[in-house]
Image: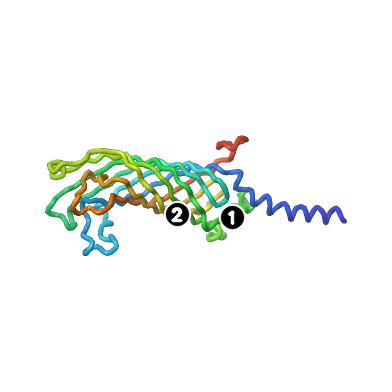
């Protein structure tokens, strides 16, 4: 009888401890994302007096896309380190803006490497469940307990190439370059299974250049260029190997 009681007490104590460490079995995570990119430069857009919070600058005509890949490493249950590589395009035109008579238009392709940290200020409860780890507990039974919410920030760079129309080329433009950027934003993740997550992330970048559209007006331009991504993501968790490196073995 005493042995049975002792065994029960050991199990009751051990399960919460083991559940709290389940995330350590999958420290590495590979993630891909895709979505629209929004650019705010010196070409196009409306003047501040006609544009509340810049909302009129967010139009389908100006929107392009980006795709990115990420490799994440979990430092703790609430903190990730993340290497991000992004390719995408921007578009800027004076059509339907405050400077239609100027008639400038530019298309930009870019590549952005960045290193970021993620902090999860709301963590899910599902991944602490042993039944969930063994895929014996449906995630959709309790959707809100399966969501993460996080903030991220870091540093990176952007390599860009610009193609302008005849009016912009005639005025003189900068065709390419590289500049530092500061990324920051918010995201949410649905813990769908022990191996797969789905997510949505919105992030902005402040660039240390005013030439991402090839043009800068020293008289009217008061700030450097900024741009935003809205990405839908899917990620796959990799088991940690014997030396903490990622392993593809299930």
Whole-percent x, y for residue 10 in the image: 77, 53
Q: Which residue is mark 2?
A: 187
Does residue 11 appear to the left or right of 29 in the view shown? right
The mark lying in front, picked from 1 and 2, is: 2
Upstream in sequence: badge 1 or badge 2? 1
Residue farthest along the right direction in this orientation: 1
Q: What residue is shown at x 36% (from left), y 41% (from top)?
A: 157
| Numbered disc 2: secondary structure | strand
> How many residues crowd around disc 1 within 10 Å: few (fewer than 14), some, or many (20 or more)?
many
- Number of numbered discs present? 2
**Residue in the picture at 49% in, 56% down:** 149
Counting from the top left corner in percent of width and height, residue 237 is at 54, 44
Q: Is residue 31 left or right of residue 2?
A: left
Give the side of residue 12 with respect to residue 131, left or right: right
Picture coordinates of residue 56, whole percent (x, y): 25, 60
User: Toward which corner of the image does residue 173 lie, by quadrant?
Assistant: top left
Structural distance between the alpha carbons of marks 1 and 2 = 18 Å
Crowd band around label 2 with a 10 angstrom C-alpha radius: few (<14), some (14–19), many (20+): many
Residue 209 x, y percent position in the rendering? 29, 45
Residue 79 vertical position relative to residue 158 in the rendered view, above or below:
below
Residue ID for mark 1: 126
Tell me, yes or no, whether the two marked residues, 1 and 2, touch with CB atoms within 8 Å: no
Q: Residue at point 22% right, 43% down?
A: 214
Q: Nearer the viewer, residue 238 or 224?
A: 224
Q: Identify which residue, 198 or 149, lies in the foreground.
A: 149
Quarter of the rendering occupied by the N terminus: bottom right
Rendered-image quadrant of the C terminus: top right
Q: What label sits on residue 226 in the rendered view?
A: none
Is 153 located above or below residue 141 in the figure?
above
Tell me the residue at 28%/57% (across/down): 58
């Amino acid at each position: 009888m005493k042995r049975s009681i002792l065994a029960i007490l050991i199990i009751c104590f051990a399960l919460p401890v083991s559940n709290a460490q389940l995330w350590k079995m999958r420290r590495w995570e590979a993630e891909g994302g895709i979505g629209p990119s929004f650019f705010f430069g010196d070409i196009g857009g409306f003047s501040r007096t006609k544009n509340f919070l810049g909302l009129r600058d967010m139009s389908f005509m100006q929107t392009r896309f980006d795709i990115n890949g990420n490799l994440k490493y979990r430092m703790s249950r609430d903190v990730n380190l993340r290497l991000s590589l992004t390719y995408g395009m921007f578009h800027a035109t004076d059509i339907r803006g405050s400077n239609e008579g100027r008639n400038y238009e530019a298309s930009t392709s870019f590549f952005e490497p960045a290193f970021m940290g993620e902090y999860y200020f709301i963590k899910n409860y599902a991944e602490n469940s042993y039944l969930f780890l063994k895929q014996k507990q449906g995630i959709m039974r309790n959707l809100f307990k399966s969501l993460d919410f996080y903030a991220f920030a870091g540093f990176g760079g952007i390599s860009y190439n610009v193609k302008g129309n005849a009016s912009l080329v005639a005025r003189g433009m900068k065709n390419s370059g590289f500049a530092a950027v500061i990324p920051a934003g918010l995201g949410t993740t649905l813990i769908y299974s022990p191996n797969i997550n789905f997510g949505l992330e919105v992030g902005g970048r402040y660039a240390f250049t005013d030439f991402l559209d090839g043009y800068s007006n020293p008289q009217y331009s008061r700030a450097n260029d900024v741009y935003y991504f809205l990405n839908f993501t899917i990620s796959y968790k990799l088991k940690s190997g014997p030396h903490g490196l990622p392993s593809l073995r299930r």
